[in-house]
Image (tube, helix red, strand yellow):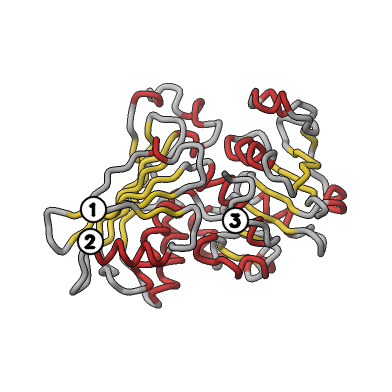
Amino acid sequence: MQKLNILVAGSTGYIGTELIKLLLNHKNVNIKYLCGNSSIGKDISLYDNLFKKNKLPKIIKFNEKLLDDIDVIFTALPNGEAQKIANKLKKHNTLIDLSADFRLKNAKTYLQYYKKKHSSKKNINKSIYALPEIKKSLIKNYKIIGCPGCYPTSALLPLIPLIKKNIISHKDIIIDSKSGYSGAGRGVHKKFRNNNLYESLSAYGIKYHRHNSEIQQELNLLSGKKVDFTFTPHLSPMFRGILTTIYCTLSKKNNVSSIISLLKKFYKKEFFVKILNKNKPISTNDVINTNKCLISVCESKQKNKIIILSAIDNLIKGGGGQAIQNMNLKFNFKKEMGLK
């Protein structure tokens, strides 16, 4: 088949470079343009030595004319920038956004959490919150695809089936997440220059972390009422990976075995989600450089409680890999194409 022409905007950030690496392994795409702001005219190999083996275009400034011969635009830009591009899309373009610009279905919620007005309100209802294992075939109906955040991906994949089947309490869910510092972008090194980034663990975004909004949105959507949870993220002294620990209260007549059985059945046909046996310890090392999400359900010392462990690579399953998953669904490619 004819290859899709691809434009990557925000190509030099951690997520952007990871996305390009994956696209180079996808036989149905052609990377036509790489766009940036501070890196215009530079070679992408300056940002990762792996690119020296590949002939890739030099980084240029985005302009609307580039969209004429482009099928898919991936945006790994600061929040607000993908909205501007969305307003310029041609009929043949598909936008796959890795920022938060099209994750929230309410412009007021976006303003509340991101402190800026949404400049593409007309496109919000034309977009989809695209958690691929959940939204599946619905994704192909949209030309604006909003990829979930990394923390919500790690939390929603185990929680959605349980909330949907009403087998855990919708109250007092605790979500505790530890992420590698790459999730904060290349600027993290300057921001934490005097805070011993590489040897310390830091809690941040307590109470008002932006990802609360999309976790709340998706859980409420499933349950039909407000789900009560507490989410606390932590920045860990490792480059990549997320380990999320979730504490839940079981509803009546359920136990760890029944939870595992339900999750295995729910994700039976999903290539990238693996449900482990009971009480299996996991680490970020189990998922680094993969598009996998590993989920382990563990017993608690309290009989009516369970502890769920969920591990992903924030740059792949929580970033570029999930974006390619969504592209594969949109264009009827094999699920694992470019992601093995």
Residue 12 quadrant: top right
Residue 287 percent across, percent down from the top left: 44, 41
Q: Is residue 310 left or right of 148 when viewed as pictured?
A: left
Q: CA distance from mark 3 to mark 2?
A: 30 Å
CB under 8 Å between discs 1 and 2: yes
Residue in view at x 46 percent, y 52 percent: 210
CB under 8 Å between discs 3 and 1: no
Q: Secondary structure at mark 2?
A: helix
- In the rendered image, which quarter contains the C terminus? top right
Q: Is residue 301 above or below residue 20?
A: below
Residue indicated by mark 2: 256
Q: CA distance from mark 3 to mark 1?
A: 29 Å
Total of numbered circles in the picture? 3
Callout 2 amino acid: Val
Q: Secondary structure at mark 3?
A: loop
Q: Mark 3 or mark 1: which is in front?
A: 3
Residue 227 percent across, percent down from the top left: 34, 68
Residue indicated by mark 1: 298
Callout 1 amino acid: Cys
Residue indicated by mark 3: 335
Q: CA distance from mark 1 to mark 2?
A: 7 Å
Q: Between residues 71 and 298, which one lies in front from this camera angle?
A: 298
Q: Secondary structure at mark 1?
A: strand
Q: Between residues 30 and 105, which one lies in front from this camera angle?
A: 30
Q: Residues within 10 Å of mark 1 (few under 14, many from 20)?
A: many
Residue in view at x 81 percent, y 42 percent: 32
